[in-house]
Amino acid sequence: MADGMSELHDLTVVGLAALLRERKVSATEVAQHFLARIRAHSHLGAFLDVDEEVTLAQARAVDLRLTDKVASDVSSLMGVPVAHKDIFVTRDLISTAGSRMLEAYRSPFDATVVANLGQQGMVTLGKLNCDEFAMGSSNENSAYGQVANPWDVSRTPGGSSGGSAAAVAARLVPAATGTDTGGSIRQPASFCGVTGIKPTYGRASRYGMVAFASSLDQAGVLAQTAHDCALLLSAMCGPDTHRDSTSLDVAAEDFARMLDVAVDGLRIGIPDEFFGPGLAPDVRLCVEEALAEYQKLGARLVPISLPRTELAIPVYYIIAAAEASSNLSRFDGVKFGHRAREYGDLIDMYKKTRAQGFGDEVKRRIMIGTYVLSHGYYDAYYLQAQKIRRMIAEDFQAAFAQCDVIAGPVAPTVAWKLGDKREDPLSNYLADVYTLPASLAGLPGMSLPVGLGSGHMPVGLQLVGNHLQEAKLLGLAHRFQKVTDFHTNKPSGF
Ligand code: GLN
């Protein structure tokens, strides 16, 4: 075993990969180290299914592959552990999507994203807790319990990829997959002080991602650094047009080799609407300091306007609910998942199954979605929302005529206390105001840690790029991480 083994978990993906490549440590040793940490910190509630036999078998297979390879032939992710948001289906581990409906569900196949990372030799440590069907911003909607924020266990890690963000922040895994429909990678990354990116809609295959709102759902990654995110993003993305009709037919780029973006002269658009009275002063301060850092590096801050920012909330919660109500109709107790034990006729079986299988938030969305799609309301709500969605996308294109990237806060506040917004869905929805617009426009967005706000809680900076401009975002974040050390901050006790 290598020296400093106890610090393995502090290494980045890049750092771990180097040790593995040089055979200073085996994939099995790395996996064992992280599995022990997952056991030791199970109180966070970040992991759902963990199967040590499955993980160690994968690690041993990687070690065998490593023995007859010269270091230069080893993929940059070989033997590095990863964990998957439980919204991705996996053959060897249970896939619940955070729902009772899929309790103990085993998929006959792996999601494309999972398969792609596996092909690069990444070793799966387990499945990560998330809001039920990825609906939520606090991870309190999971049927399998809430997740604690490692920075302060009385607070939310954010959601819906709360397990992913908490696990990376607590150094239980060097990188994790997540999904972002309206902010679910960026917001938990911000709340937990890690780096996360959601690519352009269509970059990553949705095949094997349990569907929430299909026109918005997008897979991405959370890790300590932008460099690590770049490595995983390149491996997980790519065309999958036979299995996902919205998959973009563009080859994955080697983002890790594109990190050297020129910041000098770069125009960073600052949307006026992201800095209104709703933004907490501590978050504003961290974000402004980060922007000042970019100015020092030569970037120019350009005031821009995204005039329909606030409209993104009703538009998103109409469209996402509408799509959810349609997607979730498949959970009827017939094909897979939960079925009520006792029932009368077929209709009664549907009713009881769905009443038992879905949690409150999911039921709320199905009801809203069914309502806005129903005859008489479709034109007033759904169609109207679609029109404004288009305008929001056009606002971004107008903004990108004036700037190269857009920057602002990820969320109006730092992570709130668990329970604070549980009884008030609307206040949860409102907190998504800065992440929803980019989602509706299908644009890539990321969050990088830029400081600590009130309660010593992390604050993220959001970067949004035009379509397929992930390399620019990652490069900008990487540049920031070369001259600052916020990304190395970690919660005490981990
Ligand atoms: N908070 C938003 C919602 O509840 C976004 C969730 C997501 O991105 N999956 O729908």
Image (cartoon, rainbow, N blue to C red):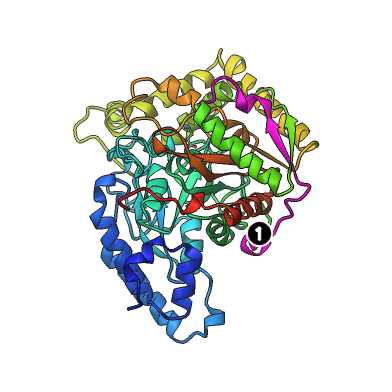
The outermost residue toward the left is 342
63 or 274, nearer to the observer: 274
In this picture, residue 162 sits left or right of residue 315: left
> Closer to the camera, 259 or 177?
259
- The number of discs equals 1
* Amino acid on which disc 1 is placed: Leu
Give percent across and percent down for residue 309. Answer: 63, 25
| Residue at image mark 1 | 259
- Residue 34, image x, y percentages: 32, 62
Q: Which residues are magenta?
A: 254-280
> In the picture shown, does residue 24 fall above or below 490?
below
Residue 492: give x, y in percent of width and height.
33, 49
Q: Residue at x 27, y 48 (%)?
A: 104
For residue 334, what is the image quadrant?
Answer: top left
Left of 165 or right of it: where is 409?
A: right
Q: Quadrant of residue 391?
A: top right
Quadrant in which the N terminus is drawn: bottom left
Asked if residue 269 is positioned above or below residue 86 in the image, the reply reads: above
Mark 1 Cβ inside 8 Å of ligand 1: no
**Where residue 328 appears, x then y in whole percent?**
43, 34
Q: SS for tag 1?
A: loop
Task: Name the residue located 56 percent from the left edge and 53 percent from the top edge.
Answer: 243
Q: Is residue 371 above or below residue 38?
A: above
Callout 1 crowding tier (Cα within 10 Å): few <14, some 14–19, many ≥20: many
Q: Is residue 367 magenta?
A: no
